[in-house]
Image (spheres, helix red, strand yellow):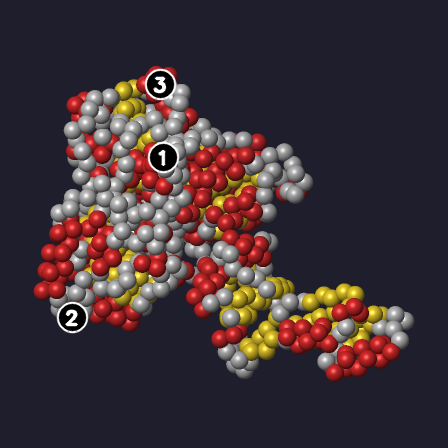
Amino acid sequence: MELTGAEIFVRCLEKQGVKHVFGYPGGAVLPIYDAFDQQDSVEHILVRHEQAATHAADGYARATGRPGVVLVTSGPGATNAVTGIATAYMDSIPLVVFAGQVPTALIGNDAFQEVDNVGITRPCVKHNFLVKDVKDLAMTIRKAFYVATTGRPGPVVVDIPKDVSTLKAEFHYPKHVKMRSYNPVSKGHPRQIRKAMELMLSAKRPMLYTGGGVILGNASKQLVELTKALGFPITNTLMGLGAYPATDRQFVGMLGMHGTYEANMAMHNCDVLIAIGARFDDRVTGNIEKFCPTAKIIHVDIDPASISKNVVVDVPIVGPVDQVLKAMIAHLKENKAKPDAAALKAWWKQIEEWRAMDCLKYSTDSEQIKPQAVVETLYKVTKGNAYISSDVGQHQMFAAQFYKFDKPNRWINSGGLGTMGFGLPAAMGVQIAHPRSTVACITGEGSIQMCIQELSTCLQYNLPIKIINLNNGFLGMVRQWQEFFYQGRYAMSYMESLPDFVKLAEAYGHVGMQISRPEDVESALKEAMKIKDRLVFMDFLIDPNENVYPMIPAGAGQNEMILV
Amino acid sequence: MRHIISILMENEAGALSRVAGLFSARGYNIESLTVAPTEDPSLSRMTLVTTGTDQIIEQITKQLNKLIDVVKLMDMCEGEHIEREMMLIKVRAVGEGREEIKRMADIFRGRIIDVTDALYTIEVTGTSSKLDAFIEAINTGDIIEVVRSGVTGIARGERALHV
């Protein structure tokens, strides 16, 4: 039987097992929305801005490991989605973004609500498609999901002209898809794995440095097993938090620009560095010339282009992280091999000395609320079990430093692109994926205002997110840089005329709270967590002068941190 | 170092812009670029000349391979290969110079493919440096127009780029 393109679209999503689509209607996608209305296996979440649709789908994907799905209209619908697409691209998050397009006959005519969406999104997608014939629609959708979710994941955009969704074709959803030009690696090379193991076992000062790839590759279990078996110190990148339990003794904290003293010093002084699913980002390496000067480097990554891109490595292994880690564990068992215990003991003694510096300590004798204390208390009150989304800035770093993630997929933040406005819509996606879990969005008064309109979506779908607004009246990270590097000239980092967030939350139909005294932090958080069925917006008025420490200034090496 | 990279890619709309976009986004050089379908109409073959250190060339080939439309590629300079470029050059040919230009075209095994009483249009094929040498050999003032195809190349012997 022949179906219209719009019907085919909906059937494809069903076949693909999609449960939720985040989107916003418009002229070019009206036929698709009409088809949506006549089925009930896929739920559509109506956001208030297309940027939020992509962030919500992104949060959904990060919290579940399943691809996030977005549907927007042509022109401004598509361009609004671009920030979210770029955010997902930088963090390798699987998204499939469907956009309407003007009818094929009008493409290139500067038609109403026309943009060259394939052209605009090309540099920030894993791949994109323009469907010109309804006969190709099902296969293209199948390919889009396949490309988005395999290999190094990423966003895929599918542009669907309006006439393609109204014309008819036979519906057949292909079970399998094979593309001669796309064959992700399925197995790390055994000889390289053996070489890596030999190098690791000969190390005197080994260091594990693991990133978001471990979470994306669903390899947290294997990472914990290998790390325990080796007894090596381990650090996670901002994107990798939760892949290894933060409360475990072998975990030395996050590394990088605002990482711990012990993590960065261990990186700088190690003799064998084992990088797993991490990409040597500039926020991690600091000055590349001074990076890990004494280390031989092993790098496991599914993307060959990530290897030796920023830092030349000695033992590259291209393959899926879970498979490579399993092979490493098997190698240890088969060879009954053990690392050098005496050397490791001395190395740990050194690391414990660095750790004893207690680099994250902050003053608690202030009259004002310290942002670190809010995050620590949130951790305590939620027993470390919440899903935490964040926006971008100082609050993001405090969240990463002070909320100890013991499980993967719990820490939802825009690491690569650093997108303010990400936190609230991402939290919506997480809450929709896990309706009974506690979801908190740690944000600031700058970031939250970039997608504040989503408070309306939260009411419509009854999403009981807890918003932790660390309000210091400043764009905190900008202010910190201006204080350190621009002689305290605070150009445009101070926000006057902030809204009354309590009233604002109430206007949107939610609960608003304002907390200004340190002694009220815990009781307020407890009270908010008791409200299970409503969104609570908690406006914490915090110390405006607090900075994020430690800090590696731009151009410095990992051993050149500014401590408090 | 100069490298000639040959790429087999899906003959899809926009495939060329993915390659061009990659080079501009990542700041790689393109000296020349040619593209045309192969004997299999579903495949295009692109030949790209670029320069860079070994590390940059390695990144370029990895990033190209990562493009979904790219089926296969080969760095011609990794082995013995043949390189060819075609040039059409229109030169003023009057008086004593007319015979001289004809001789020069013969030396370079060029062919005169269009003639007026004042002009020759010459076709020359060879490596890029041979074409450069031909341009050098002609008096600059006599050159009216130059068009070059960009480099194409093929590996010698058994080595081949095919699906």
Q: Amino acid at mark 2?
A: Asn
Q: Position of residue B97 (x, y in %)?
A: 84, 76
Residues at marks 2 and 1 on the same chain: yes
Q: CA distance from mark 2 to mark 1?
A: 59 Å
Subunit of label 3: A
Provide the secondary structure element on which disc 2 rests: helix
In this orientation, does residue A367 appear?
A: yes
Q: Amino acid at mark 1?
A: Gly
Q: How many C-alpha atoms fall within 10 Å of the one at disc 1: few (<14), some, or many (≥20)? A: few
Provide the secondary structure element on which disc 3 rests: loop
Q: CA distance from mark 3 to mark 1?
A: 28 Å
Q: Which residue is denoted by mark 2 in the rendering?
A: A335
Q: Which residue is denoted by mark 3 in the rendering?
A: A500
Numbered mark located on residue A488 in the image: 1
Q: Amino acid at mark 3?
A: Asp
N-terminal label among 2 and 1: 2
